[in-house]
Structure formats: structure tokens, C-alpha cells
Amino acid sequence: MNRTIIIANQKGGVGKTTTAINLAACLAARKRKVLLIDMDPQGNSSSGFDISGSKVDKNIYDVMLGEANIEEAVIKDVRPRLALIPSDVNLAACEIQLSDQENRNTILKEQLARIRNNYEFILIDCPPSLNILTLNAMCAGDTVLVPLQCEYYALEGLAQLMQTVRLVSERLNPKLIIEGILFTMYDSRTKLAAQVVENVEKNTDKNIYKAIIPRNVRLAEAPSYGMPIIEYDSRSSGARAYDALAKKVIRYHFRKS
């Protein structure tokens, strides 16, 4: 069994990269072989493991431009059972540099075919926009996991993403589906957070993960130390929530396999 999960939301600041880093780490801690691909030019999934994409020989930018095969960009054993393909700011230029290339939307899919069977889970952290990088991820993936911040405009962003996934599945990748919605930055002290959860549950038929990610200081601190939360503070509420999510993701995909 292997699955490629895209972590995406066209709205920024929703906990997308936090989810990519910590879900990858928790899956690996649960004895799953994981590859995390940083497709965001900001490179935060890379720095979340204390790696700079600009300081390695090859990164995802080189792969997308055809200057390296994907095997050359993999950093093995970032953590036990966890590998990483880092990113850097140059990736932002891909939209222009690949504009005339016929296979521009399927470059990542073609490259991933070379190594896909080496991993049980491949996670792709996308930029917060619909561009050639996100399209490449959606063409290469099996499912989309949607982090959703518990705020007023959450449903608006969700509707936009669901429309994007529908269009990609119709035109580019027929197997692509939304795996589930993950509530993030949940503050139990506010009525708004509970109202957002209730509103989304009433207005979507998609799977909603019960592992709600809390607004947590330790979770916010961990990236500055280049650590996932299970290393930085394994007893924190954030660590427990992401470990619960990893369990649910494993169960979901074994059920589907």
C-alpha cells in the first residue's frame, strides 16, 4: 500500500505546513515509511526540519526544471523512516519557466513514479494558491487533506478548493478525491470556533477528521527549533492531536486499500 496525500488550501495561514510537518513526523513515528515533498517556495516544511533547500545539492526546483531526477533531491533519514525533498525561493519562478512545456502539469507525477513504491505515505505541502505547483501536486496525488482554520471565512476557502479538486479530477487526474477536512487553530474558549465546526459539518458531505488541532503555543514554537511537535514537546495538546490524526489517516488508507 502506498498513498500520496496533498495538503492544500488556497487560503494562507490555515496550518497547512504545520500539518505537513507534524503529520509526516507522526506517521514515521508510527513505523510508516514517509516522504515529505515541500512544494511551497517559502520552504517552511524544509526549515521545519532544520533544512535549507538552498544549501543542498538538489531540491524540488531542480526536479521541476528537469535538471535532476527526483532520487537526487531526496534527503534520506531526516528522521527515522522519514525522507524530505526540500524547496527554496527559486521555485516561485516555475510558473514562468515551464509555461511553454507540454507536460508542465505532470512533471511531478512522472518523477514520483520512479520512487513512489519506496514509501507508504508521500505528503505534498502545497503553496497557498492555485498555480503550476499545486496542479502538479494534484495530478500526482491520490487524495487532498484540507486544513481549515476555525474562523469566519473558512467555508469560503473550502468551497474554492473543492471546486479546484473537482476540475482537476474531471480534466487531469480522475482518481483525485478529497480525503478529509482537518480543523486547525481551534480555540475552545471562543464560541466562533465551535460555530465554524458546526457550520462546516452541516454544509459538506466530505469526511471530517475528529482529531481537531488546537491553538497551542508549543505547536507554534516548534518550527523555530527545526523540530516537529512530537520531538519538541510530546506531551503537548498539539502533539497528541497530530498523533491522533496520524492514527486516523493510517486507518482511512488501510480501509481504502
Image (cartoon, grey):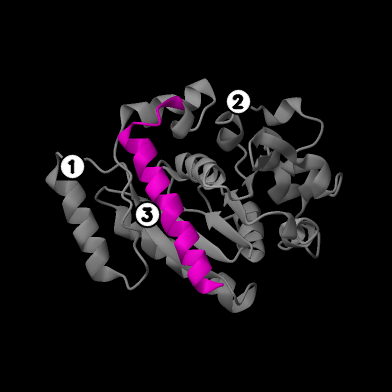
Inter-mark Cα distance, 2 to 1? 31 Å
Label 3 belongs to which residue?
182
In the rendered image, the vertical position of residue 126 relative to residue 49, given as above or below? below
Q: What secondary structure is marked by label 1? A: loop
Picture disc at residue 50: 2
What residue is shown at x 49% (from left), y 46% (from top)? 23
Q: How many marks?
A: 3
Residue type highlighted by circle 2: Asp
Looking at the image, which residue is at 63% across and 72% down? 173
Q: Is residue 24 above or below residue 224?
A: below
Label 3 secondary element:
strand
Q: SS class of the residue under badge 2?
A: loop
Q: Nearer the viewer, residue 136 or 146?
A: 146
Q: Is residue 256 magenta?
A: yes
Q: Which is more N-terminal, label 1 or label 3?
A: 3
Give the quarter of the image for residue 40.
top right
Q: Which residue is mark 1?
A: 188
Earlier residue among tags 2 and 1: 2
Q: Is residue 79 visible?
A: yes
The mark that comes first in sequence, 2 or 3, is 2
User: Residue 45's x, y, as percent?
Assistant: 57, 37
Q: Determine if the magenta segment contains residue 159.
A: no
Mark 2 surroundings: few (<14), some (14-19) or many (≥20) residues within 10 A: some
Specify whether 9 is left or right of 91.
Answer: left
Query: The magenta stretch spans which residues?
Result: 232-257
Magenta-drawn stretch, dominant element (helix, strand or loop): helix
- The amino acid pointed to by label 3 is Leu
Q: Is residue 164 visible?
A: no
